[in-house]
Structure formats: C-alpha cells, structure tokens
Image (tube, grey):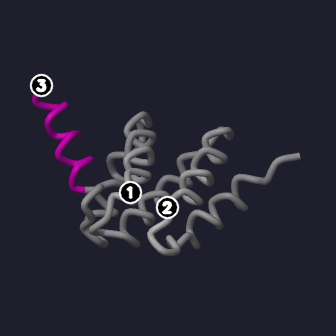
Amino acid sequence: MGRSISEILDDIDAFVPIDGDWLPLDRLLDELWQHDISTSAIPLLFRVFEKFPDDDGSGVLWSLAHWLETRDDYESALRNSLSRQPSLMGKIMLRRLQESETA
C-alpha cells in the first residue's frame, strides 16, 4: 500500500535541499503525480515556490510549474502566492499565463 496524499504533501511542505540536492523533492513529486490531486493541494504546492523564491530547484521546480499549468484551477492560487511572496517560478508562470491570454 502506498502513502497517502497528505503524507506526501507533508513531506513536500517540509522539504529542504541538503547540499543542493533537489532529487528528494523530485521523487516526492513523482510519488504525488501517481494520485488524483485535489484543488486544495494547489496552495501548498505554490508554497514550495514561496519557500525558495529565487531558485528553480536545479530544474525540479520546473516540473512542478508544468504540472500546475495543466490545471484549470491554478490562476487564483498563483496570484495569491505572488502576493504573499514573489518568486522566480511564480513570476515565470504569471508571464506565461499572460502571454497565453494575449496569443
């Protein structure tokens, strides 16, 4: 039996890279993607960007951004995240969202 979504989200929320190693977060995200993730998890996932506002997580945060962009319900959570803590990945996502709206 696999771990619950809440256990995985707790580990994601507590994640801190050790010696620049982001692979544990990558594994947690892979584990999370195996589940049907509700809208209520989206703000917690944006907190990862807020926690590391100037980082792309050695590319790991890009996979999180790409997954969030597949959701129809991420825009307000993105804007709320950016109002709490502007982040590199959040700003990139907002710019991409704006570009897609004008295209």
Residue type at mark 1: give it: Ser
Q: Is residue 1 left or right of residue 69?
A: right
Residue designated by label 2: 22
Pointer 1 or 3: first along the chain: 1
Comparing labels 3 and 2, the label whose residue is closer to the camera: 2
Name the quadrant of the C terminus.
top left
**CB of mark 1 within 8 Å of CB of mark 2?**
yes
- Tell me which residue sits at (50%, 70%) in the image: 17
Separation of marks 1 and 2 at Cα, in angstroms: 7 Å
- Tell me which residue sits at (55%, 53%) in the image: 40
The dot on residue 103 is: 3
Comparing labels 1 and 3, the label whose residue is closer to the camera: 1
Secondary structure beneath disc 3?
A: loop
**CB of mark 1 within 8 Å of CB of mark 3?**
no
Mark 3 burial class by Cα count in 10 Å: few <14, some 14-19, many 20+: few
Residue 67 spot, x, y in % from top left: 45, 40
Secondary structure beneath disc 1?
A: helix
Q: How would you classify the magenta stretch by its main secondary structure?
A: helix
**CB of mark 3 within 8 Å of CB of mark 2?**
no
Residue designated by label 1: 58
Q: Nearer the viewer, residue 37 or 28?
A: 28
Residue type at mark 2: give it: Trp
Residues rendered magenta in the picture? 91-103
